[in-house]
Image: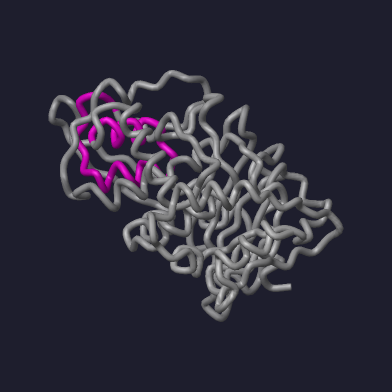
Amino acid sequence: MKRFYGICLWIGFSGIVLTGCGRSQASYEYEPERMDALAADVLPENSQAPAFASDLCVIMGDEAGPDPSVTAEAACVFSLEDGKVLLQKNPYERMNPASITKVMTALIAVREADLQETVTVGQETVITESGASLCHINPGDTLTMEQLLYGLMLPSGNDAGAAIAVHMAGSLEAFAEKMNETARSLGATDTHFVNPHGLTDENHYTTAYDLYLIYQEAMKEPEFQKIVGTVSYTAQYTDGEGNAKTQVWKNSNQYLSGKTQTPEGLTVTGGKTGTTKAAGSCLIIGCEDENAQNYVAVVLKAEGRAELYQNMTNIIQEIVN
């Protein structure tokens, strides 16, 4: 008990809302070790914790979980305005995020790369794994970093992710190290990446809560906001023989494409899908209510695409209920 109150004081109750308001009978057991790890990894010596936590949602325990009709393995809704957790299910369970991984890749690129710089892509773009999503770029193609980001985030091109990683860090492994450093700096202490695109690896994992931390940080970047909110993008570039090439990339987010109806009173501002056999069907979105209040919602490991969007619609409905 003393440990619990010590953690509460560390975060600082003044001006910070620590708990959420779930809507069912399930509960989640608080994990004190997580807060210790977060403090050790994120806070520099002699820094003040409230400055770190003041704009974040923090799950402290005893929040009610979602209704049993939420069938995905993990699901959460976070308010960016007041720090409330509206709903949570397995927020700290380590899972494969599939292509939601690309949010971190895009965050690093928009912060550190010259988006107008041209990139001639190499053999790293040759990805033969069955079912891997591609934007269909080939070795020798020359695109801008901005175009690669659209190829990464709209059609979820694993080939674009590999090209970004090799261009920025020299190898997929070196870029993964950069991803992990960035994750730790954001407090995403249950995250470990081994590639820039999310293809399955047992050592590649994150949690619904960590994905919230990463996505809300990415949404601070106007270029990221623009890209993930784009429905369709036309890329014009040159191939390895110097010929002009044009591709139209569509956003895989069904709320943006209109294939799935957004609950009344909400607007989906962007997001990222992810699907592999290991990860199931996954989705993270940003959305806004009629009062311009912003939220992040995460669904991980739904059984299929239809179940994924039904689960997401169910949980974001909590915002307007």
Q: Is residue 49 above or below residue 91?
A: below
Q: Is residue 216 left or right of residue 25?
A: left
The image quarter containing residue 207 is: top right
At x 68%, y 51%, the residue is 75
Q: In what quadrant of the picture does the N terminus appear?
A: bottom right
Q: Where residue 305 sits in the image (x, y, percent)?
A: 65, 41
Residue at left offset 54%, top offset 35%: 205
Single out the residue that lies furthest toward the bottom. Answer: 291
Q: Is residue 74 above or below residue 193?
A: below
- Residue at (50, 54) in percent of width and height: 213
Can the viewer see residue 64?
yes
Magenta region, mostly helix, strand or loop?
A: helix
Does the segment drawn in magenta span residue 282?
A: no
The magenta-colored residue range is 138-167
Measured from the top left, where is residue 61 in percent x and y? 72, 58
Q: Tell me what residue is drawn at x 75 percent, y 63 percent.
A: 22
Please check the rendered image and state whether residue 148 is part of the magenta-colored stretch, yes or no: yes
